[in-house]
Each structure stands twice: as structure tokens, then as C-alpha cells.
Image: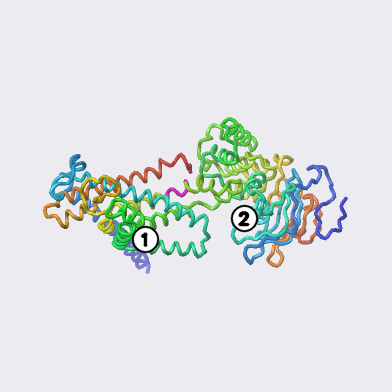
Amino acid sequence: MVEVATQQPNTREWLAFVLVWGSAVLVTATFCWLLGDIIWHGLSHLSWIFLTAPPENAGRRGGIGPILVSTFLILGVCLAVSLPIGIGTAVLLVEFTSDHSLFGRLTRRSLDVLAGVPSIVFGLFGNAFFCKTLGLGFSILSGGLTLACMVLPILIRSTEEGFRAVPSNYRLSAAALGLSRTTTLFHLLLPAAVPGLLVGLVLGVGRAIAETAALIFTSGYVDRMPESLLDSGRALSIHIFDLSMNVSGGDANAYASALVLIILLLIINGTVSWLATYGLHRKIVTV
Amino acid sequence: MTPIAEPRPQHWPEAKPACCKPHPFVDVDRLSLHYGEKSAFQDVTLSISRGCITALVGPSGCGKTSFLTCLNRLTDLIPTCVVAGRITIDKLDVLAPQTDVIQLRRRIGMIFQKPNPFPLSIRRNLEFPLREHGMRDRTQLSSAIETSLREVGLWDEVKDRLDFPALALSGGQQQRLCIARSLALAPEMLLMDEPCSALDPISSGVVEDLIVSLRGRYTILIVTHNLAQARRIADYAALFWVQNGIGRLIETGRAKQLFEEPRNPLTTAYISGIRG
């Protein structure tokens, strides 16, 4: 009797231990393998020249200079459009719409559906709407706008969560001090909602910078240095896709480009979490 | 001398000159409040004297806090909330739609049960509302901050760390900071919703002494569950009670009279600890 009572939990605990640690190790190992593989094959090709030079011979030789520029431009357009719209919508949903109103429920449901739409669908939509209907053609602008559509649902929903995490007594005490709603919003709620916004930003940027399908149909394939936002430009992820799928002998540069992409993602993640802990400390001070 | 045989007694004959003459500052006339279908309280008629401490006592859920939030129209923030009746504060019709709510709330400060400083520095907590109400001048701001912190006895404790987070203060200090934040706006009246109940006994005592020290300069309406506290500090008292699920004002008068010679048998039961 006693033995059973002591044995059973032990077996169970051992099982739980293996399961928990096993899955953690599996996830970490997969990531390390992937990263190791990319670093192993890519690091030797990485150099300042690679980062700045234009691609030659369909990317087999040369660098990724124009591609990096196009990537940043597309990302810039995407953020410039999606950040204000995203924050605005989140504010509208949380602060100015009641939770049960038809408008609020409809908007939230649409956003959740949009967040799950495959990126190829966004690509086709972007091609039909931005490239053709609005006449922007295959351009960085079309690509950025399409990405903005794709990123918005994630951005809005996590910003909304950020606003909901702000204790409601801030709103009450601000109102009791005779502060207007706009003041409360800009000076108290917005700074306090920043962590949620940053989470949305990381997820959104991560999705945008790694996007391939949506960009093939909108920002195009051209690997020249873009001269304006209306020029076509090849994003980093498309470059990797092209080198590894369509260009024989492009593997080495594909690896190097993938390494650059991952480093970029790490830098963006690092900057955002640094911002979250230190950069905004002056505005909002908690313990 | 007012005749005692009124249907709902409001002004009792003055027994002592302790807190000035009863000079009405707030007049509440047949006030009712509903949250959607549910009625929080009904038909409350009450007069609050200028410069005095009036305590609202009664069991939980009898509408005391709801009553408080009518006076500064914080009820506007609750979508389903409907207020009927009439509130006059110093000739201002509070419930009229054209009343400037921002100005109203500057004139009538509110202190909540749980201390709720903003997640800003101590200085910014005080400075931010002042700036919003139009004070821009640096020296004027810092003197207003010092004055209000001195008024709540917090200045010596925090003068060297004004730029530290307000949330790092102790509960009692936070509550005094919140009172200072309201006082900085030079209000005429303070609404206090159980300001001591979330504090430890010592901090609670400090805040209570502070409230007493504000008597005369501000009209104070305080909700409290602590009858001993109400007895210690209040000049006037009003007892709310739940009847058929709806809050009602069942007795009001000088605190001394209400606690020592209550007229309503329910009051007698409540203050002696039999009911409530």
C-alpha cells in the first residue's frame, strides 16, 4: 500500500520530467540545428562587400545590396501605414466602443479571420487591388501596402490586449481629476499599452520581413537598386527563395542571405525588447 | 430650530458649534440611480454642509459609492448608468447636460478605496493634472506641488525622491499622494470612498488625522464601513440601508445625534452591531 503510494507519483513525475524537458530540448535543438546549418554554410560568404554589392549572374555571385535596400523600403512602407492605423483601430475598439456592440464584435471577428488568411491570398489581393486597380504596378509601394494589410490584424489585436491590460482605475482616477479623454489616452493609456504594442510589432515585423508569397505578386522580382517607391524591388526572402529554387549554383549565396535575414530578425527583436525595458522607462515608471 | 416631525429629517437642531453653522454646499433632491434594469438607490434627499465632514455609512451594496460617483458625474463613464433627480453644488446644476464636467471634477476631488497613483514619478503624478488644468509655469508648478505635499504631510518623506516612481511608495504614502494630487487642483470638496480601508492600521490612522486636518477648508463626504472612524471624525452622518434590494437613505443628521440617539430602529440596530 505504502509502496504503491510512493512509487506511482515517482513514475508519473519521471514521465512528466521527460515530457517537459524532452519537448523543450526538441524545440531548442531544431532551432539550433537550423541556425547552425545556416551559419555553417553562410558565414564564410558573409562580408561587407556581400552586404553592399549588387547581385551578379542572377545572384550566384555578387551581393545583396539592392535587395537589402528594397527590403527596408518595403518594411518602412508597411510600418508607416500599419502603425498609425493599427494603434488608431485598437484605441477605437477599446476606449470608444462598448464590448458588446455590433461594430466591435464585427471588427474583432473580421480581424481574427484576416489574421488567419494565408499570405498567398493577401498577395493576390494586393496584386488585384494595389497593382492593378490603383495602378501602382509591381512596386515597393504595392508590396509594402500588401504587407500592411497582412500585419494589421496582428498589430491591432495585440495593441488592443495592451490597452486592456491597463488597469481600469487609471481611467477612473484620471476622469475624477478632470482630465479629458484625449489627455488620458495620450499620457497614460498609450504609454501603459506600449508593451502590447511592441509585442504586436515584433510579431508583425517578423511576419512581414520573412514574407515571400505576398510579395512575389506585388513588389516583384527585379533585383536592381530601386530608384523610387514605385520601382519594383526584390525582398530578401524572395531572393532566398529564388536562389535556392530557380538558380542552380546559388545555394551558397542563399545561405548567406538567410543568415542576414535571421540576424536582421534578431536585431529587431533585441531592439524592441530593449525599448520595452529601458527606452520607455522615462515615460512610465513602475516599481 | 427646525421641527423634528419632518417626513425625512435633514437638518437637526444644532447641538454644538463644533463645525460651523450648517451652511448647505450640496443639495441632493430625490436622487435615484439605475444600472440598466437594476436600481442601486432611490429617492435620496440629502444636504451636505460646507466645510464639514459628512460620513456615509451602511452595509455593503446599499449604494453609498454609487451615490458618491453621482456628485462628480463619474457615472457618465458607465454606459448603462441612469441618474434621475437633482444635485445642486453651490448653485451649479450638476446633472444638467451643459455642465462642464471637467471643471466640475476639478472642483470636486475624489479619493478611491485603493490608492491609485499613476505609474509616473511622484512629481509627474502631481504635475500632470495641474498642467492639464492650465498651470504651465515651472516655479508655480513646483510651489503648488510642494504646498500640496506639505498639506498631506508627505513633503519631508519624499522631497529627495520626487522623481522616483510613485508606485514604490507604501500604501499609506500612495493614498496621501492621491489626496495631495486632488488638493493640488484647489478643489472645494473631496469625495472619499473608504480611503482607509485598504491601508494598515498605522497608515490608516495617519490618513484619518489628515482628513480631520482638512475639515473647515474643504467639504468632505466620506464613505466608510468603519463606524468607530465615522464616530471619531464626522460632523454629520447619513445611514444608507438596503430595502427590497434597493438602497435608501434612512437617517441623516449630526453624527453625534445619529450615533447616540438614533431615531430609526434600523439605525439603532446597525450602530449597535445587531444588524448590517
As for residue B269 lying within the magenta part, the answer is no
Give the quarter of the figure containing the C terminus of chain B.
Answer: bottom right
Q: Chain of mark 1?
A: A
The stretch of residues the image draws in magenta is A191-195
* Residue placed most toward the observer, A162 or A152: A152
Callout 2, which amino acid? Asp
Side of A227 where B273 appears, left or right: right
Marks 2/1: CA–CA distance: 35 Å
Image-quadrant location for residue A45: top left
Circle 2 Cα neighbour tier, 10 Å, few/some/many (<14 / 14–19 / ≥20): some
* Residue placed most toward the observer, B102 or B12: B102
The residue beneath circle 2 is B76
**Residue at x 74% of width, y 61% of height:** B43
Callout 1, which amino acid? Ala
Side of B33 where A245 appears, left or right: left
The number of numbered badges drawn on the structure is 2
Q: Position of residue B76 (x, y in %)?
A: 62, 55
The residue beneath circle 1 is A115
Taking the view exactly as shown, the residue that stands out farthest to the left is A249
Q: Position of residue B240 (x, y in %)?
A: 72, 58
- Predominant SS along the magenta part: helix
**Is residue A287 in view?**
no
As for residue A193 lying within the magenta part, the answer is yes
